[in-house]
Image (cartoon, rainbow, N blue to C red):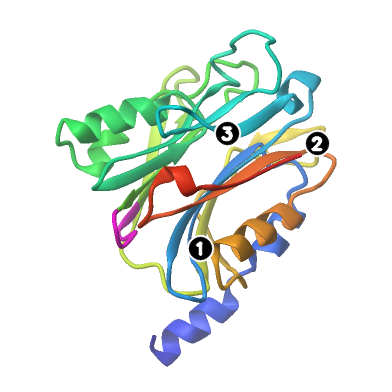
Amino acid sequence: MSEQEREHQADQPDLCEVLTSNPYPGRGILCACTGDGAVFGGYFVTGRSDASREREIRLTDGGEVAVAAKSDTGFDPLRHYIAATASPEWLVFGNGAQVSTVAERLERGLHAPVALDDLEHEPDGPIYTDRITAILHRPSGSPAVLGAARRSMASGSSSDIITMTVRDIHPGRAVLLTTYHSDGRTIDGGQPFIEVRILADSGTGLLDEMWSSLNPDYRVAAMVLPAAAEVAIALIRNS
């Protein structure tokens, strides 16, 4: 890393600072490189309502990661979904059913930015939550492609698609995308693609850093996925 890159990274806020200043971030995705040089995908869930908080992250029998109800309370497609899936070539994770859609598009040979196109925000008016998704190319984790489908401010009904390709993720660096920026009462859309510093030297450390940065009044679940390994060894924490 050049001296200029080190100075740029030093100017970036750290993950704890960003999440602490955003008490209710909704759901978030993180593409990060820990101090040991390994690339990880991170995902977290926060919630305010009882229904949102009665969820957990768990592995499925099919080798995917799901956000599911803790008990048999019925299926809600906006709250329960496959949050991460992988092939030998890529890892996809995000906050809704679009994860499976993007994975199917990649299987058909579409390039990552194209696979993230033409998605829609959630139909949960009046909030209209963003659909946020990340693709990590395996086994290196680079490039990482992140996308958000956000309600158009111009039309009010369709979605605008915002994508970012990160060619290289250096140790100690991460890119964060959240659905909300909120104090828990008033909700605004999340700030897109926040570049942050991380302190973690391993996947376990990254999960600890992410979990401890989330407001305990709202945190529900979090996971960390190594780009180079099977989804089945995901590190998961539930409240």
The residue lying at 34 percent from left, 59 percent from top is: 141
Q: CA distance from mark 2 to mark 3?
A: 26 Å
Report whether 35 appears left or right of 49. Answer: left
Q: Is 122 situated above or below 237?
A: above
Disc number lying in front (2 or 3): 3
Q: Is 64 situated above or below 227?
A: above
Disc number lying in front (1 or 2): 1
Q: Which mark is residue 174?
A: 1
Q: CA distance from mark 1 to mark 3?
A: 24 Å
Q: Main SS of the magenta segment?
A: loop
Region in magenta: 138-144
Mark 3 highlights which residue?
58
Q: CA distance from mark 1 to mark 2?
A: 25 Å
The residue lying at 48 percent from left, 85 percent from top is: 6
What kind of element bears circle 2?
loop
Closer to the camera in the image, 206 or 14: 206
Which percent across, then down, holds residue 101? 33, 25
Disc number lying in front (1 or 3): 3
What kind of element bears circle 1?
strand
